[in-house]
Image: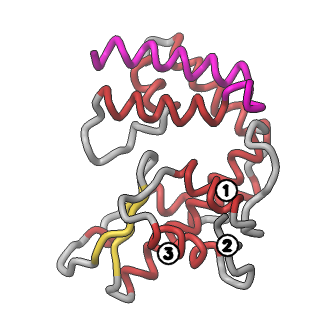
Amino acid sequence: MASDLDPTLDLADQLFSLLREANDGCSEYQLIQQLRARRSTHIPHLSLTDRLVLFRTHFLLFNALYRLRDRLWEESSAHLEISALHIQLHPYQSGTAELSEQDPLREYYLDMRHLRETTEQDVEKLLASFWTRMQGGDEKRAALELFELDRLDEPVNLATIKLRYRQLVSLHHPDRGGSTSRLQSINRAMEILQRYYT
């Protein structure tokens, strides 16, 4: 069994410890599971089927990841790749202007007001806007957003979509305490994306 994480460490330092062990990187879901298994006190240990708990857990994780990425960059010690599907430490390479470019995701996750001020109703509105866009004809974009694949640097392909689908089903399946309505949204989005990417 994995040993508990040092409770005195900040979440960013705990993530750094976990990512150093994951040579090939890992997904957000795998990081959350490892933090829980090692008894991190920095994330909620409540059911991820609660949409607000899921949002807050996701936000805290990504806030810590962006803080860690900034610190590693300043120290010229490593580069942290952060995407919806894959999080991985890479050796530092000088001469990259990556952090000088405006990154709206980084700005969003480093602003703690988004954590404090986002309510369950806000999370519900995000899901509702997904269905509104679906019915309004922007189904491909809405499906990619639901899968959090709309802002990847690399092109999206069917293999990437299927991997993300399996991760989301694992997270939200009712047999594991998930939400039936959320699973229906995921299945509908997968049907749409298969039409565009097959």
Q: Secondary structure at mark 2?
A: loop
Q: Marks 1 and 3: which is nearer the front?
A: 3
- For the residue pair 29 and 61, the one nearer the viewer reads as 29
**For residue 62, what is the image quadrant?**
bottom right
Q: Secondary structure at mark 1?
A: helix
* Magenta highlight on residue 191: yes
Q: Say which residue label 1 marks.
A: 114
Side (left or right) of 21 relative to 119: left
- Whether residue 103 appears in this view of the structure is no
The part of the chain drawn in magenta is 173-198
Q: Amino acid at mark 3?
A: Leu
| Mark pair 3, 2: CA separation | 22 Å
**For residue 98, what is the image quadrant?**
bottom left
- Where residue 131 appears, as percent x and y from the top left, is 59, 18
Number of residues whose C-alpha sits closer than 10 Å to that of mark 3, classed few (under 14), some (14–19) or many (20 or more): many
Q: Say which residue label 3 marks.
A: 68
Number of residues whose C-alpha sits closer than 10 Å to that of mark 2, classed few (under 14), some (14–19) or many (20 or more): few
Please say if 176 is above or below 5.
above
- Where residue 125 appears, as percent x and y from the top left, is 69, 31
Q: Secondary structure at mark 3?
A: helix
| Mark pair 1, 3: CA separation | 19 Å
- Whether residue 66 appears in this view of the structure is yes
Sequence order check: which comes first, mark 2 or mark 1?
2
Q: List the single residue furthest toward the left.
A: 95
| Mark pair 2, 1: CA separation | 32 Å
Please say if 167 is above or below 93.
above
Q: Which mark is residue 3?
A: 2
Sequence order check: which comes first, mark 1 or mark 3?
3
Q: Residue placed at 43% from the left, 30% from the top? A: 144
Q: Marks 3 and 2: which is nearer the front?
A: 2
Q: Amino acid at mark 2?
A: Ser
